[in-house]
Each structure stands twice: as C-alpha cells, then as structure tokens.
Amino acid sequence: FNTFHWHLTEDQGWRIEIKKYPELTEVGAYRKETLIGHGGKKPFKYDGKPYGGFYTQDEIKEVVKYASARHITIIPEIEMPGHSLAALASYPQLACTPGPFEVATRWGVFEDIYCTKEETFEFLENVLLEVMDLFPSKYIHIGGDEAPKARWKECKTCQGVIKREGLKDEHELQSYFIQRMEKFLNSHDREIIGWDEILEGGLAPNATVMSWRGTEGGIAAAMQNHDAIMTPWSHCYFDHYQTNPETEPLAIGGLTTLEKVYSYNPIPDTLTRRQSKHILGAQGNVWTEYMTNSDYVEYMILPRMAALSEVNWTYKSNKDWESFKPRVQQHFLMYQRMGYNYCDHPY
Ligand code: ACM
Ligand code: ZN
C-alpha cells in the first residue's frame, strides 16, 4: 500500500479544522450521544454520552509529514453532496430546508444534504482551498456516495438549477454538482476521485471512480477510459466481521474472511488489456462506527491488510491460499514484536 485515503467528514462528525469556518469543528465535530449496538430494533437506544473531536491543521501537517517520510501519499476526502449532516448542523443555510440540524447520533444515510445553491459551492471551494494547502496529493476525494434526492426534488432553488442548466433530473443535478467541483479542483491542478455513484447522471470528464457497491462501477469507468480504484463491499470492507460474529467483538455486520479477501482479483475478466490499465489498484475500507480506539482498528485490518497487499502486487495465477496461510503466520510474529493487536484466528 502506498496511499492512505482519509475520510474526514461525515454525518456523525466533521474531523478537520477549517479556519474560515470555525463552527465546523465547534459544532460539527461533536454529537450529543451515540447509538448503542446495531439499532435493528426501534426505539433506538442511545448512550447519553457526548462524543467528538477533530484534527487541527497542525496535527494534519504532522500526519502528512509522517506518511510522506514513509512514501505514503494521503488523499483527503471531503464528502459532498451527501453525508454532510455535521456541516449542515454547523451551517444550516447550506441545506435545502431551514433546519436546524443535529450531528447524527446513529449510522446510515440521511436525507438532508447540501443544497445546490451558490452559497454551497462558495463554502465547499473555500474548504477545499484549505484542504489543498494541507495535502499535496494529486487527488482529492469528493465523496459522492449515498446522496438521497428527496430534498432536491422539493427544493425551489435546486429545481431552478435543473431548469437553468437544462438537466433531466436530480441525478444529472448531482453530476452537475460534481462536475463543478471537478472544474474547480482541476483549475488548481488537482484531480477528483468519487465513489461509484458519480457515474450516475454522467461522469465528470477527468474523474477517477472508486468502486464500492461492487465491481460494476470500476468496470464502467474503465470502459469509458477513466481510472478506477476497486474496493468492492464483498471483499474489501474491513469493518465487516472476519470470523464467526458470535464470538467476535461488535462490528457493523457482514462477513469478509481473510480467505475471501485473498481470493479477490482487482482486474475484472471482462476488461481488455488496455482497459485494465485503468484499474489503479484495490483499497481496504475501514469505517470506524464500532471501532472506538486504534487497538480495535488494528484488530480489524490485521491480517486482512496483508492479504489485500498480496492481492495488489501478485498476478492472479500466482496467488495461492495454501502458501499464504503459513506465510501470514510469519507476519504474526512481526505483529507481536511491534505490539500490534491483530486477529490471531483468521481461519
Ligand atoms: C460507502 O461505503 N458508502 C462508500
Ligand atoms: Zn436545494
């Protein structure tokens, strides 16, 4: 791995200091409480404990420097237009409805997203100017996933933009949103990455697609001569359980075993040789809803991260699970020596 994709903003918290917009961290970095357990059954139960925090710009510079000294590039992600409740709690005027909004206290997808009004673009551009000052990476991730269109359908301003721009529907409005942000970032010599929903309503001209709902988004991008990063939910989500959920610490769900990760082939068979050059690699995703400390993060990524590393650098016909098993045991010795908390029973 040579890249760290840092997801810095969410419904449940805004985690990066932006000097121009202090409320993002004064308000948006904190939630009043957190859902207990999975919340499958209503009414939801909450812990009643305020939770939050953020990275100052000085701290971020330190992390970027630490990574760079180890040849790791950090790609920051600022989510838009969805997963933005923490920002809307801080600046409700950026939403389609008057609010007020609260930083989310449970997980999932929320209908309140950024409005497509000019004020939103001005805000996001100012945020990205500060982000670009902190992160020298060629790429900036702009999110783009899971943005429900309910508010845009009812909003006079958003419907006005659809009319003004001659767009067909709210999906094309999302595409307009992303393309505007792309133009802005391109004008600062940066390129965008977005989750695979940015394909809907038409791909921005220079965008790289991060394929998460499956491999289809990555395939579609490569076929349109766009770059793609593969991180399908089925093989690359390290927030899933890695062995029997009944005996594991609480996780969000799913079951993605070490063997399953190892079985992944990032280059889809359906692509031609030329198209497959657009697949830049595969990413492991670590969403930390249920990981409240770094020990737990280590447990969830080790050793699955080792499996995905080998997947990334090994031609598929050379991969061999039976040979990987004893070799990963050698890594366990190294993890022990380095004091890492890892899953010692992954098969
Ligand atoms: C995602 O997992 N919503 C990208
Ligand atoms: Zn609106």
Image: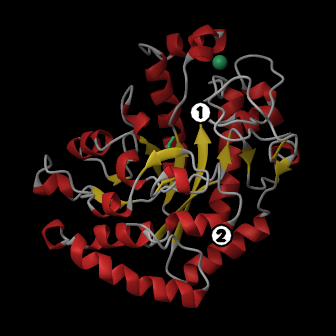
Q: Is residue 170 above or below residue 55?
A: above
Identified at 71% across, 46% down, the residue is 126
- Residue 295 is marked as 2
205 sits left or right of 144 in the view: left
Q: Amino acid at mark 1?
A: Pro
Query: Crowding at label 1, few (<14), some or many (≥20) Cα neighbours within 10 Å?
Result: many
Q: Quadrant of the C terminus?
A: bottom left
Q: Quadrant of the N terminus?
A: bottom left
Identified at 81% across, 20% down, the residue is 99
41 sits left or right of 311 in the view: right
Identified at 54% across, 40% down, the residue is 181
Residue 12 in picture, x, y percent from top left: 72, 41
To which quarter of the image does residue 155 belong? top right
Q: Amino acid at mark 2?
A: Asp
CA distance separating discs 1 and 2: 32 Å
Identify residue for label 1.
Answer: 81
